[in-house]
Image (tube, grey):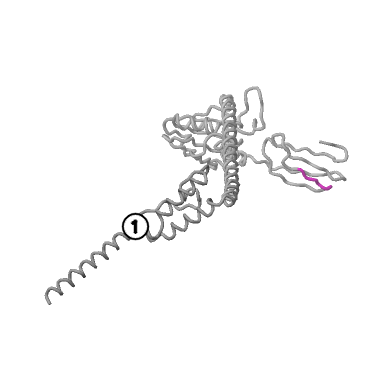
Amino acid sequence: MTTVSRKGTIFIVLTVLSFLLDATTAIKFHNKPSGPKTSDPYKVLGVKRTATDEDIQKAYRQRAKETHPDKNPSPRANEEFRRVTDAFETLGDPANRRRYDAQTNKEEQRRRRAREQHRRREQQKRQREDRERQERQRRRMEMADKARATQDRVAKISNLEQFERMVLDASRKVYKTHCLMMFVSNKNAERRGDEDLFFPYPFAGEPGRGNAYEGMLLITKVRFNAQSDLTRFFRAKSNSNVPHIIFAKRGDAVGNFQIFFYNPKRRGVDAHGEFKGWVESLLLIEAIVANHHSLPVDYLVVRNDNIILHESLDPDYQNTLALQAQDRILAFDRRLDTF
């Protein structure tokens, strides 16, 4: 009785150990990372595209042996074996193989064309960016040269008394002229004003050449190290690394002025464009165009040799325009004049 019991116990233990061993083996195969799945039959069989029929048959027999469910305990054995047989059905038959090669060649040509088009677009983009960068550099150098040429055209003002004498009317309560001033307290601020904003271009004319702003705008640059009555009046800060630019408008009461807020993130041509646009917006002139003739009259507004407005005006009508200082108005009779 005791002997039978021991044999039964031994049999149960061996069965449990066998079950655990099979489970462990299955888990190992299940967790074993499989290679990258691919639908390319050449890669499934592990042969080159130049492989012979004999090479393909040999590779198939080897891969079928490795992946057959009777030999492979992996839970994915059926799937792997099916992929091997599908690959051989494609490559093992010469007609199927030719069709597959023709199809994949077309796909590869399509992908190659897409890559070439992408490469060409990227190349054109880089070339366009290079041209734009070179153009910005050329414009920057051109404007820097013009700005240096206009430095001597700015007025010399160092204190509030000089400013009042040159800019204010007899009552000392109203600005008698437009005034554009840049305060710089150190070399960094002056460099940013000169190299980023190109101050005072284009508002100060180049030597020997006038411009539309002469006679209507007083321009000055004020260098200072410590606070003075002039810098306090215009709230310029000492030890600031950015220029302090103000615009006082003719006819406004003393103490009223606009401040340009310099953005250090905008450099060169972009910063100059922002500064130039700010000044031009403050220099807008109101002009009235009236037609006192018995027939309609056409008129053009020309800015920098470009027509920005073309309208027709009926008899006894008038229009009010906001113009910049450099704008020109040309009136003509379309029946007689041609442009």
Q: Relative to 288, is 5 on the left or the right?
A: left
Residue 106 position (above or below residue 12): above
Residue found at the very far front of the displayed protein? 54
Seen from the viewer's position, the closer of residues 272 and 135 is 135
**Residue 148, how many percent across, how many down?**
56, 25
Name which quarter of the figure residue 4 lies in: bottom left
Helix, strand or loop status at disc 1: helix
Residue shown at 48% from the left, 56% from the top: 85
Seen from the viewer's position, the closer of residues 274 and 6 is 6
Residue 269 position (above or below residue 286): above
**Residue 311, how many percent across, how many down?**
78, 45
Residue found at the very far bottom of the displayed protein? 1
338 in the magenta segment:
no
Number of callouts: 1
Quick one: label 1, few (<14), some, or many (20+) residues within 10 Å?
A: some
Residue shown at 12% from the left, 77% from the top: 1
Q: Relative to 1, is 96 on the left or the right?
A: right
Quadrant of the image containing the C terminus: top right
Residue found at the very far left of the displayed protein? 2
Residue 168 position (above or below residue 290): above
Residue 6 position (above or below residue 339): below
**Residue 5, how many percent across, how many down?**
15, 74
Magenta span main SS: strand
Residue wearing tag 1: 29
313 in the magenta segment:
yes
Residue found at the very far top of the displayed protein? 208
Seen from the viewer's position, the closer of residues 26 and 92 is 92
Seen from the viewer's position, the closer of residues 38 and 155 is 38
Q: Amino acid at mark 1?
A: Phe
Bounds of the magenta segment:
310-315
